[in-house]
Image (cartoon, rainbow, N blue to C red):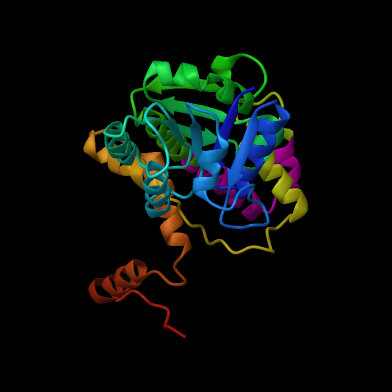
Amino acid sequence: MTHIGLIGLGKMGGNMRQRLRNKGVEVTGYARSRDVSDVDSIADLVAALPTPRTVWVMVPHGQPTDDVINELVKHLDKGDLIIEGGNSRFSEDIRHASELAEHGIAYLDCGVSGGVWGLENGYGLMVGGDKANVDRAMPIFDALRPEGNREEGFVHVGDVGAGHYAKMVHNGIEYGMMQAFAEGYELLAKKDIIKDVHGTFAAWQRGTVVRSWLLDLLVRALKEDPNLDQIRGYVEDSGEGRWTVEEAIANAVPMPAITASLFARFASRQDDSPAMKAVAALRNQFGGHAVKKAE
């Protein structure tokens, strides 16, 4: 039986632990919350694993990931494998792999898509790293991915960093798709001749070129809250959208839709736009156009 360690048991990690167990993979999980953790420390997790060990890291990118990997280095041995499954920037993967190689520890990066529905439906996996390490971890990937053909839910994208690079672009596309659905929703809701906004989106779920899981989720959201009165139009960005736009600039790739969707999120956080205030002031200055006074 395959036996792995899993560090990070939040919404994604906790569900991944359960899916792995459901598929016959033994999992020893660690989290700072004693309510969900199987062991008391990372050292205890490592001690519980058979050698050569495989440890999947599923914590937020940046310093939390660095801290976990630095702690693992103290306890792992040559020949062990770390799979970084959070949303780290691809350049961080390259650094991690280089540092771990000095200790003889192998490294894979894995972009994971599926959200809270992955437990039931499986996760889309995008992996970067050496083929030998990918082959070694394939029982884990097969347990996590959706049922059916492997190539429809799993890809070995390329070298270290490639998995998270692909996931970054995936999330950038997701930004653009969500923004397109949102703009369509606003226009439908605005037009007085449209009497059934929810029904319109629901009717697009089969037979249309825009059918998708995101559309299904929007239909579900509108069923629960037809006018979206229960939430504010305030949207954060988690990093991947920004990195996608930065990479587009670095590689001179035109990316107007994804860039606009990122900027729309910035705009959502403003109660009143300083830029539009400046535009209003300029129109008033050069043309005497009326302005609305601040309250």
Q: Is residue 201 magenta?
A: yes
Occupied quadrant, residue 77: top left
Residue placed furthest toward the bottom: 295
Q: Quadrant of the N terminus?
A: top right
- Residues shaded magenta: 175-202
Pick the front one: 203 or 171: 171
Left or right placement of residue 25 versus residue 43 in this view: right
Pick the front one: 29 or 66: 29
Q: Is residue 9 magenta?
A: no
Occupied quadrant, residue 255: top left
Q: Residue at x 29, y 76 (%)?
A: 288
Camera sees residue 215: no
Height in image: 18 above or below 291?
above
Left or right placement of residue 255 versus residue 16 in this view: left
Q: Position of residue 269 (x, y in %)?
A: 46, 65
Q: Position of residue 15 (x, y in %)?
A: 66, 41
Q: Residue at x 48, y 61 (%)?
A: 268
Residue placed furthest toward the front: 47
Q: Residue at x 23, y 72 (%)?
A: 286
Q: Position of residue 21 (x, y in %)?
A: 69, 32
Left or right placement of residue 280 versus residue 81 in this view: left
Camera sees residue 86: yes
Would you say the magenta stretch is mainly helix, strand or loop? Answer: helix
Q: Residue at x 51, y 23 (%)?
A: 137
Pick the front one: 101 or 253: 101
